[in-house]
Amino acid sequence: RRCWGPVGFEEPAMSPSVAMRRSIRGFYAFSFALLVAHLGSVQLQQPSLTLPVNRLASPLKHNKIALLIDADQFGISSWGPAQEAILAKGDLVESYVFASLANLESSRWVSAMKAMDIKPFAVHRKTGGNRDQNDIELSAEAARLVSTGVVDSIALLADDIDFAYLASRLHAWGHACFALLLEGGSVPVASAFKRAGAEVLWINKDGAGKNRNHASKQVILQLNGNYTVEPITDLDLLLQFVDPAAVAQTLQSLNYISTLDDPLIPALAKFYRANDIGPCIVYPRHLGLQQALATMAASSARRCKPNPGNLAFVAAYHSSSVQNKQALAHYGSEQCAKLCLGKGPLLLESSPTLADEFLTRLGFLDEQHNCDFGEAVGVFCGGTKNSKVLRTLGWGSPSALDDRSKRAWLHTVLMSTKYSGDWSVVPVDVCIREFFASRNFIRHREASIPDVVRALKKYSVEHGLPLFNNYNALVRSVDWHFRGGDPR
């Protein structure tokens, strides 16, 4: 039940695109089988599947609830508050946490799961795959739990808009669904869950003041393009719920967003710049929405300028987690540290060189060691965070396009109102340098880039890897080879 193949089976290395297509095909086939089993167990009448969800004849029941936790997004500190929120809605009969085997076997996780009576669900990561296995396993388990009558409702501790589809299917089958989100979290995700018929429950983490992801500093984008990091003077503001409907409606009327579900912070940064209003809080987003409510109330009498259509918002995050205690203390939280240790928030103006400027700002393109624009785009699209954003937007990969078309493609992505502006900067090469130094391929970790390039090319030739022009592309290729992936 919890494996996609026989025990011990290991798929050969494959490209991420092939792995994704296979996962999707398998998921659809498995979902269809579960749907047939579900229809047989609850004996729904055929016409009910074709009716809109708001025409269900009877109210949804939620007496027996199962809590499913996506550990890719929510750590231990969120589990307790989630269980408390569900207990207020009905009988919590099952709790599962979906995570890698390494996490589930750690003593800290084992202790937490035992204390909260949460069952582990090991998700096996396939070679060449990505983190979407968690989504597939969680969705399949939700269907199993309701189809077999173990529970009649599902609670999702998962901050991913893709799960709104699962919520809509559960609702269509006559089962209640709860979406548990952290207060101050994503408004578009909450809206998507509500449209799918789910009830959104906002929760707070226990011991939030001690959690390294809890914000105590704010990042403010100034009108001159610079940003500042300032302390949050009133932490209680983080606990106040903000209804962004009025803000979204105003931004939509001025064409800063195309639909009410579009991310609001990028639109607000453009709105502030175009109307010369003043600094804009971009992190934490919760405070940015509070600021916008006050700003728009004060500016209701003035005539605001519509979207000029020439601005691209970028929030460039560090590509790795931040563990340094001094950095965490200085920036107040890991998320703030990753933003500021990346390239911070940026507003770029539309121009024929927008794509080049963007890749240069994020470290993927330069005039010395990363001059090939096409390869720079490939490395940018190959990052875990960046590739997931592009898949969510439905943009895919431009690998088959020429450089001119790639520039136009990236320009269009950056000007879209559909994404939050969050990107990862170019990954660091520390691991490659450490490995090469340990094997005497380079003399020491601080070797010059030309020395590392020679070592990378020699290694690539010896192992049959493609030879790239850009330093970043060579690093990515060798790194993927270490991880058993396809560098092509």
Image (cartoon, rainbow, N blue to C red):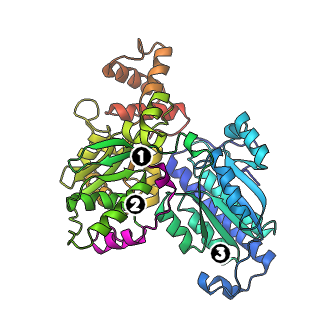
Q: Residue at x 36, y 16 (%)?
A: 447
Give the x, y percent position of residue 433. Answer: 44, 22
Q: Identify the residue under disc 1.
A: 232
Give the quadrant of residue 207.
top right
Amino acid at pointer 2: Leu
Q: Is residue 267 left or right of residue 460?
A: left
Q: Identify the residue under disc 2.
A: 289
Choose between 295 and 134: the one closer to the eye. 295
Q: Neighbour class for label 3 at 10 Å: few (<14), some, many (≥20)?
A: many
Give the x, y percent position of residue 230. Answer: 36, 42
- Say what secondary structure mark 1 lies in: loop
Magenta stretch in the rendered image: 234-261
Any part of residue 400 in sight: no
Give the x, y percent position of residue 161. Answer: 52, 62
Q: Which of marks 1 and 2 is in front?
A: 1
Give the quadrant of residue 76.
top right
Q: Identify the residue under disc 3.
A: 171
Q: Neighbour class for label 1 at 10 Å: few (<14), some, many (≥20)?
A: some
Q: Nearer the viewer, mark 3 or mark 1?
A: 1
**For the residues marked 3 and 1, what is the alpha-carbon distance in whole angstroms?**
40 Å
Amino acid at pointer 1: Ile
